[in-house]
Image (cartoon, grey):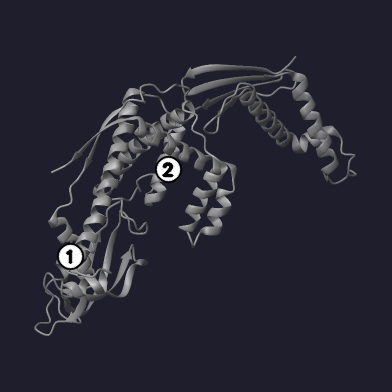
């Protein structure tokens, strides 16, 4: 009797594989396992290689049974995938009957797969490309931000009490649950009162303090804060006011443009800033246009997506933001609600990300948009150039077939979106 393999369609993205192994194959695998065990087993009172089978079964029966089942299932499962050209996107859900050598082995493996579909109506999409105009006020604001970044600290001699708008040199230690947090502490830092460097009510609590004063300020950080050690937590800061000052700004003239803008005059600096802002506006318009194309594409081609891929993308988003997978049991109601709302938003974004990736991959296949090894190598090299501290670890990851496949898929998706954008009917609109 040969191995029997059946495949049942449960949905466009889920299949149930049924496998039945004949008794003789199970017995042969058990016999082989015991022969190997007999050579390795060391049991007091028996010479090596001479331990009776009944003794081995008494000592190692459960272990042998577990190993044999695992090997038979693993080998036959991979064989089933290969024979039926299935690519599971996650570990299978295995349900096995009790193994009896005289009856063989029966089990089922439920798997999720990428859906099989053709993308339609993608070569004539209509989209509007809206480029925001660059105003004189925007140029003024950009130059002023640059000027403010060059401000020098000048000690206030007219008063020794902190007011809004002051520059204040402080030393502080952030404490969470009685433990100092290195990433939320500094011996000396200059902050502008009212600029929102710290979440409320930090700035408000500084107002009215004098040079040399110390105080405690409690701050609630949002769950999506970039620093993982304080995201979603209440931090108590021990703060000392070391100095009070004001901003001393450089004059906004031709000399400013020469010294700090690498330009011959203030007018030339304005032209340079205008060009940079126009380039940024064009990039934003392109990004918005491409996002609109993807939304339209998904509306025309709705597909079911494997939950395993959604969960994988969702977990990656949580990791990138440093968020917990579940809300801590000791979280206060406000923080718990904040975390739950953020996770719900991220899960929806993860689903849309997977949907767009699958559709774009399919467009790339339909249009025969190939990705070369050289393109993958260049993309990997680009990633490594921007990761000096973790270069070796990332290089090791990118050498794996799985990582290279992911890079190939991303490049294919980009090529597909480029193809769609290149064939779309684009109307331009410079907003006023």
Residue behind mark 2: 315
Residue behind mark 1: 267
Above or below 173: residue 346 = above
In this view, which residue lies farthest toward the bottom? Answer: 157
What residue is shown at x 79% (from left), y 26% (from top)? Answer: 28
Q: Position of residue 380 (x, y in %)?
A: 51, 50
Above or below 406: residue 110 = above
Tell me the crowding category of disc 2: few under 14, some 14 to 19, or many 20 or more residues within 10 angstroms, Cα based: some
Q: Residue 187: give its label.
A: none
Occupied quadrant, residue 416: top left
Q: Position of residue 392 (x, y in %)?
A: 56, 58
- In front of the other: 273 or 264: 264
Question: N-terminal of the two: label 1 or label 2?
Answer: 1
Q: Quadrant of the N terminus?
A: top right
Name the element at disc 2: helix
What residue is shown at x 52% (from left), y 21% (from top)? Answer: 15
Viewed as shown, does residue 53 lie left or right of 238? Answer: right
What residue is shown at x 33% (from left), y 70% (from top)? Answer: 185
Above or below 90: residue 285 = below
Visible in this render: residue 414?
yes
Name the element at disc 1: helix
Nearer the observer: mark 1 or 2; the answer is 1
Q: Position of residue 384 (x, y in %)?
A: 50, 55
């Amino acid at each position: 009797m040969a191995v029997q393999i059946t495949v049942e369609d449960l949905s466009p993205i889920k299949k149930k594989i049924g496998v039945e192994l004949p008794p003789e194959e199970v017995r042969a695998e058990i016999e082989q396992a015991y022969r190997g065990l007999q050579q390795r087993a060391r049991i007091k009172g028996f010479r090596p290689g001479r331990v009776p089978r009944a003794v081995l079964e008494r000592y190692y029966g459960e272990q042998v049974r577990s190993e044999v089942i695992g090997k038979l299932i693993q080998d036959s499962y991979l064989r089933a995938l290969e024979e039926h050209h299935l690519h599971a996107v996650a570990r299978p859900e295995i349900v096995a009957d009790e193994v009896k050598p005289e009856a063989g082995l029966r089990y089922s493996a439920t798997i999720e797969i990428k859906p099989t579909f053709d993308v339609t109506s993608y070569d004539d999409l209509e989209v509007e490309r809206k480029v925001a105009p660059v105003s004189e006020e925007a140029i003024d604001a950009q130059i002023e931000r640059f000027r403010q970044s060059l401000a020098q600290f000048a000690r206030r001699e007219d008063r020794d009490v902190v007011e809004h708008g002051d520059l204040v040199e402080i030393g502080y230690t952030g404490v969470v649950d009685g433990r100092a947090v290195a990433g939320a502490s500094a011996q000396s830092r200059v902050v502008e009162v009212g600029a929102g460097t710290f979440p409320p009510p930090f700035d408000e609590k500084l107002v009215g303090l004098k040079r040399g004063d110390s105080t405690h300020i409690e701050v609630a950080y949002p769950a999506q804060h970039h620093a993982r050690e304080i995201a979603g937590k209440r931090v108590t800061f021990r703060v000392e006011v070391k100095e009070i000052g004001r901003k001393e700004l450089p004059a906004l003239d031709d000399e400013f443009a020469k010294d700090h803008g690498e330009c011959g005059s203030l007018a030339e600096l304005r032209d340079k800033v205008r060009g940079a802002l126009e380039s940024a506006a064009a990039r934003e318009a392109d990004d918005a246009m491409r996002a609109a194309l993807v939304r339209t594409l998904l509306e025309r081609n709705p597909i079911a997506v494997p939950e395993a891929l959604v969960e994988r993308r969702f977990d990656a988003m949580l990791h990138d933001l440093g968020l917990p997978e579940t809300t801590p049991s000791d979280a206060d109601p406000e923080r718990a609600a904040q975390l739950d709302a953020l996770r719900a938003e991220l899960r929806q974004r993860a689903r849309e990300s997977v949907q767009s990736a699958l559709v774009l991959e399919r467009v790339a296949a339909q249009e025969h948009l190939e990705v070369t090894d050289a393109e993958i190598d260049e993309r990997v090299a680009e990633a490594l150039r921007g990761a000096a501290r973790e270069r070796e670890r990332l290089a090791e990851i990118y050498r794996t077939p799985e990582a290279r496949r992911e890079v190939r898929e991303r490049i294919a998706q980009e090529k597909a979106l480029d193809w769609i954008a290149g064939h779309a009917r684009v109307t331009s609109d410079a907003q006023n």
